[in-house]
Amino acid sequence: MAAVEVRDLRKSYGDLTVVDGVSFTVEPGEVFALLGPNGAGKTTTVEILEGHRRADSGTVSVLGSDPAMHERGFLERIGIVLQDAGFDEDFTVAELLVLQRGLYPRRLAVDALIGQVGLAEKRNARVKTLSGGQRRRLDLALGLVGDPEMLFLDEPTTGFDPSARHHAWGLVEGLRDLGKTVLLTTHYLDEAEHLADRVAVMVQGRIVAMGTPTELTSAQRGVVVSFRIPRGVPVTSLPELGCTPVPEGAGWTLSTVHPAAVLHALSGWALEHGIELPALEVRRPSLEDAYLALVGPAAGVEREDASAPGGRA
């Protein structure tokens, strides 16, 4: 039996449809990432799976239960890490975890969990003294303290420094090794590529692609060439490359099925004009490249829904 089974899920707020016929399954022990731009319908979909919202139509099964029924047995088997959880600011880290732990029949040891999420030095610190990244670590600990069979992670590493992010990735990989099922939403495409067994991309309420990260990146033709040009050299002076470079960070990037020809044209132009091309690189498409190709203009658009509580879709 699938850990999660969603069939033709639909949800609207007034005239705005935020989830439009979504279907997917998540297998037991799988890390499944749901990706998409702001307003794509990810949060609404996940909240229906958690039982926080009701679908207008379609069927949803999580661990064999209908989340909308709010059965105690179901709630005891899942863990949830929200984007923005509310805490009693006067509790200490340990006190809050002990309180949450008491709600579950299966429980993890508090001190061991505090160490796992990197809060050992903050064990007796009050929540109001924690930094944003430390609060996210506490969020993660609260989601895990009931030893859930399935964990929902909504943007779990927002506010983490690179070291903390990689530590959190290790925790998620450890959950997979223990046979736990994880449904992840994230705007960090490298995070999804590193952690997810499969990925679904949502755009305007619909799933536009689904598969392993390798399957999605393999669907992109050609390779990516990236480079920088010296300050003061206009991009319009570049030679004909067969496709138009687009800005990326401090440099330029393009996708091509003829990388040798592009490199020949670029290097010949640079030698002719006595110009160096810093950071010249040729690489296979990443999940981020595949995602941007799938999402297109929606990548830069936030579709805020004032009808949805919290303004998120």
Image (cartoon, rainbow, N blue to C red):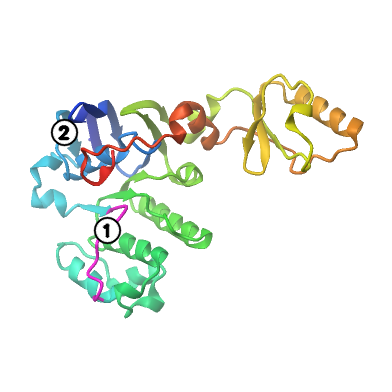
Residue 24 percent location from the top left of the image: 29, 30
Left or right: where does residue 57 sit relative to residue 160? Answer: left
Query: Callout 2 environment at 10 Å: few (<14), some (14 to 19), or many (20+)?
Result: many
Residue 83 percent location from the top left of the image: 32, 52
Can you say whether 259 is above or below 301 in the image? above
Left or right: where does residue 83 sit relative to residue 212? Answer: left
Looking at the magenta stretch, what is its main secondary structure? Answer: loop
| Residue 285 can be seen in this image | yes
- Dot 1 falls on a residue whose secondary structure is loop
Choose top left, top right, bottom left or bottom right for residue 122. bottom left
Q: Quadrant of the C terminus?
A: top left
Nearest the eye: 68 or 228: 228
Can you say whether 146 is above or below 236 in the image? below
| Magenta extent | 81-91
Tally of numbered discs = 2
Badge 2 is on which residue? Answer: 55
Residue 61 percent location from the top left of the image: 18, 36
Nearest the eye: 45 or 13: 13
- Dot 2 falls on a residue whose secondary structure is loop
Left or right: where does residue 245 sit relative to residue 162? Answer: right
- In the image, what residue type sits under mark 2? Ala
At a point 67% along the width and 35% down the height, the residue shown is 252
Badge 1 is on which residue? Answer: 85
At a point 25% along the width and 72% down the height, the residue shown is 89
| Residue 180 can be seen in this image | no
Nearest the eye: 176 or 231: 231
